[in-house]
Image (cartoon, helix red, strand yellow):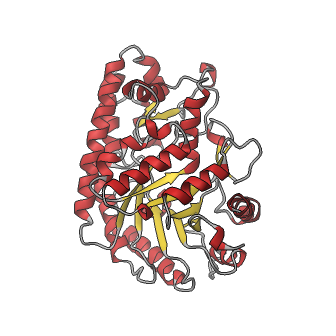
Amino acid sequence: MNFSKLPLKLGLTVDLGNYGNDPNGRGEYVKWFADDTSGDGPKMLHVYMIDRHIHSKPGVFTQDDVKRLEDELGRLSLFLRKFPQVELISFQFPYNQLSPELKCIENMDELYGSSQMNTQRKRLLEGGKIIDVEKAEEMVFDFLRILCMTDFNSLKHYPIALFHAGGILPNDLIDKNHDDYESFVDLRRKLLNNQLDYHKSLLCETRDQKVIIGWENIPIWDSVFHNSKDVSKRNIQDYQWLTEHSFEDFESRLALGGVHTIDIPHVVMDSYYYAENELNFFSMEMLRKEFMGVPSSLISPESYIRTASEFFKNMGRLTSEIIYHLADCNGLFGNNEGVRIGIENSVINWRSLVNAIKQNTPDSYGAIEIQHGHLRENYDGYIRNSLKSFFSYCE
């Protein structure tokens, strides 16, 4: 596989607890990927930071948690020295535990009638999540501090702490207050303002530090979703995202600094929703109404890439500050996105997409990010086959 044919510097996604060969029996994803690309890749790694890597139980870091995360990141930094081709690494911080989202939950209490009736609050509590804004901020800042302290000098770039804070809107709240449209407009406006304030605080916290803040776009909903028209199939896990579908939602933050990760299947789902015009999702129709039509970045995946690249160019920034997550998409529901590249009935025009990346974001990075692809037993079918398919689209 000839890396010179690719429109970007390609890598893969791993789990912080499962990425390479060591005595603990971890997978060997980085080595396999390097072998599959004749040692040219991976150029980047995207690392899942799931809850068990952040804290052992609900609450801020204990001293034991801090030490455990320091050790995990230290082991990873040592491991990366065996693979000098890796130039960039990003860490996905668990969502639902960022200040803007938690403030959004507080703002939803009034729409529910009380905090006890707020199903999103209940969901996070039952999942052992932190719902105290001050404690959650302390956890994030501790995480950033540990990232800054870890020696990633073998890399070409500082590590990226990647977030999304789109504010999850439960369907039962939409049903309860469907006719009170202005309340949802106000909820979205407050969330956007809180996102901007939070971004400023993250940039302030990391000023002159060896870490970069990044934001990723997100899909229509938060969980594996059934038919939204069939109310009988709805349950407490059916949630829509309130913001961060269109690039327009990121502009005020990225104007101040930071990088942007474009998740290809996420933007495909969002743009395909408008192109199909068959479903009716409240949060997506809010966007259509706000922008008096489909936001320009969501007309197509190619439009999203052009919009983002033109924004960075107009800011005097580098389009290499745009990073991609690569996977396929063959429909509009949760199990249709983030699947292996080249899947049957894909709704992505891959050759057009590859051409847009090549034309608009030269020297960008990308990581293959497939659902469950970071599991040992899935590497061959999910990652290796996706890698082969992606190369074929670039020929």
Please give left or right for residue 181 compared with residue 32 in the image: left
Q: Is residue 150 visible?
A: yes
Above or below — where is 147 with respect to 52? below
Instruction: Give the answer, above or below, for where 142 lies relative to 268.
Output: below
| Count of numbered circles in the view | 0
Quarter of the rendering occupied by the N terminus: bottom right
Left or right? Give the position of 388 relative to 182.
Answer: right
Q: Residue at x 39, y 18 (%)?
A: 177
User: Could you say where residue 353 lies in the image, as x and y percent from the top left?
Assistant: 60, 51
Q: Is residue 365 left or right of residue 248?
A: right
Q: At x 39% / y 81%, what residue is drawn? A: 151
Relative height, residue 82 to residue 132 (above, below): below
* Percent position of residue 364, x then y: 49, 64
On the image, the x and y values in percent for residue 5 come to 65, 68
Residue at 64% in and 62% down: 374
Q: Nearer the viewer, residue 384 or 165?
A: 384
Q: Nearer the viewer, residue 232 or 45?
A: 45
Q: Nearer the viewer, residue 359 or 71?
A: 359
Residue at position x 56%, y 50% in the image: 264
